[in-house]
């Protein structure tokens, strides 16, 4: 009897948490799902991003740099990026004298100019929406990360309140006329069970982000002493020296110095699995081409490795296009779970109204109680800020910002 009572409590927790904040949770899940394939969406929309260069061809960093400089109109080349996937061109981030930032797309093999696109693309806008709901940085990151706690509660309470849940893996939902509530419930449980692994990954990585959002994050340590090498001056020669210093580093990003005396920062992938590109970092003195700092993920402690694994796991980037598509599919399922939960609620309370029951959407809206002002208010404010940012008045909100 006590066990049934505990299950009932968990079910009430699951129903409350899944409804009161379902609007914000669904919005975060939907934008995160789209964010996993946002780079590919930009590729479809922007022909300049495409390249026919072989994926295994060496990257001509010096040619890419010269091409970027030639199309910067006297501005600054901030960063060079290797193609993210096969079929993509190399990218240079350039800030023009007017202050405008654009993306210059270049053939990674011969350095040929392919075109330019605005800095603010689909991926950049969507990532900002998902990461912070267009709120100021610290507040937005913390608020969104806080929903990882809600997702964890929903996962645990759902499993505890679902009696003998393991039987549900083979109980495929079947729709029968006039039984929408039952079908929605079966679909909700079936999809949730098969998404347990994915929900757990998103929840755990979200908890890692939450810890990081309050400033608790381990620091990586340099694993090699500075070494003076040669007086080579071209970018290719400087980067080639890394084959001696860090032969395992597959260079993906080159951040160029903003001022005289600042280093070149090189990031990429190394021998460590499940590591974001900034987890492997070497800084180079551009005058002497001397590596001055050497941070490689496979030489860090376990706590640092956990934090470095968060991004690849959260967005499914560790396996290229295959895992990104898989993450998009299960992200869509997780979003639909949130929606079917709302349908279940609106159908469950219809009997409370009798013959004069209002439409389902009004029953669902009313069920939020006072929480509806927070949930709908934040989503409406986020959409409004995004629209105003894209139109110009609040354009700074699309970049990192702190106070209005």
Image (spheres, rainbow, N blue to C red):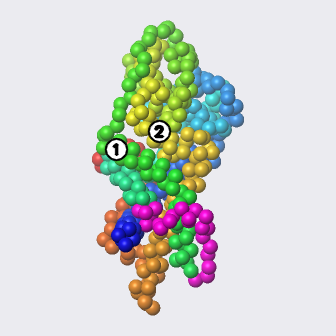
- Where residue 263 appears, as percent x and y from the top left, is 42, 21
Q: Is the Cβ of the residue at disc 2 closer than 8 Å to that at disc 1?
A: no
Residue in view at x 41 percent, y 14 percent = 226
Is residue 228 one of those drawn in magenta? Answer: no
> Is disc 2 placed on a helix, strand or loop?
helix
The answer to whether 102 is drawn above or below residue 328 in the figure is above
Q: Provide residue 234's location: percent of width, then percent of height.
A: 54, 15
Q: Residue at x 54, y 62 (%)?
A: 166
Q: Nearer the viewer, residue 148 or 144?
A: 148
Compared with 161, 402 (above or below) is above
**Horizontal placement of 22 versus 68: left or right?**
left
Give residue 392's position: percent from left, percent from top: 42, 51
- Kindly identify which residue carries mark 1: 211
| Closer-to-camera residue (25/203) | 203
Residue 202 seen: yes
Report which quarter residue 53 is drawn in: top right
Q: Front-most of 4 and 204?
A: 4
Q: In the figure, 284 relative to 29: above or below?
A: above
Residue plotted at (50% across, 16% down): 245
Residue occupying image coordinates x 37% and y 72%: 1
Count of numbered labels shown in the rendering: 2
The quadrant where residue 194 appears? bottom right
Q: Secondary structure at mark 1?
A: helix
| Mark-to-mark CA distance, 2 and 1 | 14 Å
Query: Reading the chain from its start, which is encountered first: label 2 or label 1?
Result: 1
Whether residue 135 is visible to the viewer of this picture, yes or no, is no
Residues packed near mark 2 inside 10 Å, few (<14), some (14 to 19) or many (20 plus): many
Pointer 2: what residue?
A: 309
Residue 182, quarter of the rendered image: bottom right
Magenta segment: 157-178
């Amino acid at each position: 009897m006590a066990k049934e009572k505990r299950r009932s409590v968990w079910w009430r927790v699951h129903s409350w948490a899944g409804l009161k904040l379902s609007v914000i949770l669904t919005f975060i899940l939907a934008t995160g799902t789209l964010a996993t394939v946002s780079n590919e969406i930009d590729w479809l929309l922007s022909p300049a991003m495409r390249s026919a260069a072989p994926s295994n061809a060496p990257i001509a960093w010096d040619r890419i740099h010269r091409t970027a400089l030639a199309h910067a109109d006297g501005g600054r080349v901030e960063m060079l990026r290797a193609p993210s996937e096969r079929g993509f061109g190399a990218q240079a981030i350039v800030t023009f004298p007017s202050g405008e930032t654009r993306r210059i797309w270049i053939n990674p093999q011969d350095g040929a100019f392919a075109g330019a696109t605005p800095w603010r693309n689909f991926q950049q806008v969507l990532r900002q929406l998902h990461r912070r709901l267009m709120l100021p940085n610290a507040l937005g990151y913390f608020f969104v990360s806080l929903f990882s706690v809600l997702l964890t509660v929903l996962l645990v309470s759902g499993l505890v309140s679902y009696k003998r849940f393991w039987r549900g893996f083979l109980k495929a939902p079947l729709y029968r006329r006039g039984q929408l509530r039952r079908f929605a419930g079966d679909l909700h449980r079936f999809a949730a069970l098969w998404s347990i692994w994915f929900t757990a990954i998103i929840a755990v990585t979200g908890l890692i982000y939450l810890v990081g959002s309050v400033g608790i994050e381990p620091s990586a340590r340099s694993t090699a002493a500075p070494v003076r090498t040669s007086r080579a001056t071209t970018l290719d020669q400087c980067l080639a020296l890394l084959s001696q210093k860090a032969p395992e580093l597959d260079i993906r990003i080159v951040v160029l110095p903003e001022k005289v005396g600042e280093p070149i920062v090189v990031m990429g992938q190394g021998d460590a699995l499940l590591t974001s590109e900034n987890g492997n970092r070497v800084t180079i003195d551009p005058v002497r081409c001397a590596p001055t700092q050497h941070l490689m993920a496979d030489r860090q402690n376990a706590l640092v490795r956990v934090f470095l694994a968060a991004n690849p796991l959260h967005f499914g980037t560790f396996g290229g296009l295959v895992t990104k598509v898989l993450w998009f599919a299960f992200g869509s399922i997780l979003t639909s779970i949130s929606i079917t939960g709302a349908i279940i609620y609106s159908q469950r309370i219809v009997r409370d109204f009798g013959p004069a029951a209002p439409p389902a959407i009004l029953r669902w809206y009313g069920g939020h109680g006072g929480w509806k002002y927070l949930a709908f208010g934040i989503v409406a404010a986020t959409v409004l800020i995004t629209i105003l940012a894209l139109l110009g008045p609040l354009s700074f909100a699309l970049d990192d910002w702190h106070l209005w």
